[in-house]
Image (tube, rainbow, N blue to C red):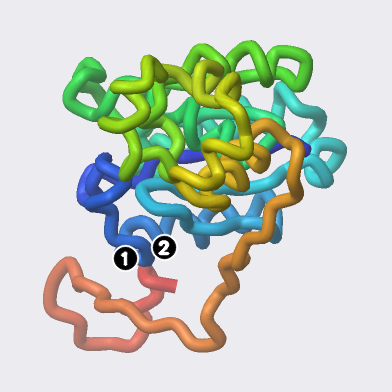
């Protein structure tokens, strides 16, 4: 699998627990991403797309990722991460600088921050990431830190039975999904059957042909 995670436009909170899924700007980014894969979903502050089956259509992995990175900036995306699993891509995305840390520039030409992880480096990369990069840990971070856990690798080193009893099975499930040990299940975005939006005219329109600029 090859997953791309795109950080939603600045109007969507960069804090996962404050994010408002299905915000208009986030949905617009998800609809735009459907041109690269039918497997697109909205997850907290990000848009995720699985593109493994699209690589050949777009000229290979390098060409596809370069195109997504370049064009996503024009759609308001603020960062991009690539990994073999969805939660790993999302975790990597959260290590990248937020909008105010990126030098100002034209969003249509400025390269957004990006980071990638190969399948061979997945475990090593995730092991080094802070706990907060995985959403399932957020409620347990203070307790885990008191136990000496500050990275996902240290969390994985704890006895699984004790982690399940103390923090719940959902935490272990999220870890397994991030590391590719358990399959994912996502609700894919679908384009609406009907679409409407407000069109601002440049001036007074007196003939029908004047509306063609909006088609």
The quadrant in which the N terminus is found is top right
- Say which residue label 1 marks: 24
**Residue 10 x %, y %:** 23, 43
| Residue sticking out furthest to the right | 56
Query: From what the image shows, is residue 43 above or below residue 130?
Result: below
Which of the pair 30/212 is nearer the observer?
30
Density class for disc 2 (Cα within 10 Å; few <14, some 14-19, many ≥20) is: some
Q: Position of residue 192 (x, y in %)?
A: 52, 81
Q: Under tag 1, what secondary structure?
A: helix
Q: Is residue 91 left or right of residue 103?
A: right
Residue at left offset 59%, top offset 14%:
125
Residue 2 percent across, percent down from the top left: 72, 35
Residue under pointer 2: 27
Q: Which residue is painted at 59% across and 42% down in the image? A: 172
> 54 or 166: which is nearer to us?
166
- Locate residue 39: give its quadrant: bottom right
Secondary structure at badge 2 equals: helix
Is residue 149 visible in the rendered image? The answer is yes
Question: In the rendered image, which quarter is residue 3 located in?
Answer: top right
Question: Which mark, by number, is residue 44?
Answer: none
Q: Is residue 109 visible?
A: no
| 97 on left or right of 121 | left
Q: Is 17 left, or right, of 168 in this rendering?
A: left
Contact flag, marks 2 and 1 (Cβ < 8 Å): yes
Compared with 194, 126 (above or below) is: above
Which residue is rendered at x = 17% and y = 67% of the image? 202
């Amino acid at each position: 699998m090859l997953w791309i995670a795109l950080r939603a436009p600045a109007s969507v909170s960069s804090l996962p627990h404050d994010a408002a899924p299905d915000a208009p700007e986030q949905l617009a980014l998800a609809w735009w991403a459907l041109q690269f894969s039918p497997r697109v979903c909205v997850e907290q502050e990000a848009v995720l797309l699985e593109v493994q089956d699209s690589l050949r259509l777009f000229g290979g992995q390098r060409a596809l990722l370069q195109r997504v990175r370049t064009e996503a900036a024009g759609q308001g995306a603020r960062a991009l991460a690539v990994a073999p699993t969805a939660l790993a891509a999302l975790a990597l995305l959260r290590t990248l600088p937020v909008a105010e840390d990126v030098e100002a520039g034209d969003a249509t030409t400025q390269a957004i921050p990006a980071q990638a992880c190969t399948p061979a480096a997945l475990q090593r990369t995730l092991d080094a990431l802070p706990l907060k990069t995985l959403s399932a840990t957020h409620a347990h971070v203070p307790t885990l830190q008191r136990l000496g856990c500050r990275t996902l690798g240290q969390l994985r080193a704890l006895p699984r039975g004790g982690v399940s009893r103390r923090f719940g099975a959902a935490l272990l499930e999220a870890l397994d999904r991030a590391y590719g040990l358990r399959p994912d299940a996502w609700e894919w975005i679908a384009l609406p059957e009907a679409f409407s939006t407000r069109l601002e005219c440049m001036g007074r329109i007196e003939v029908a042909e004047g509306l063609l600029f909006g088609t």
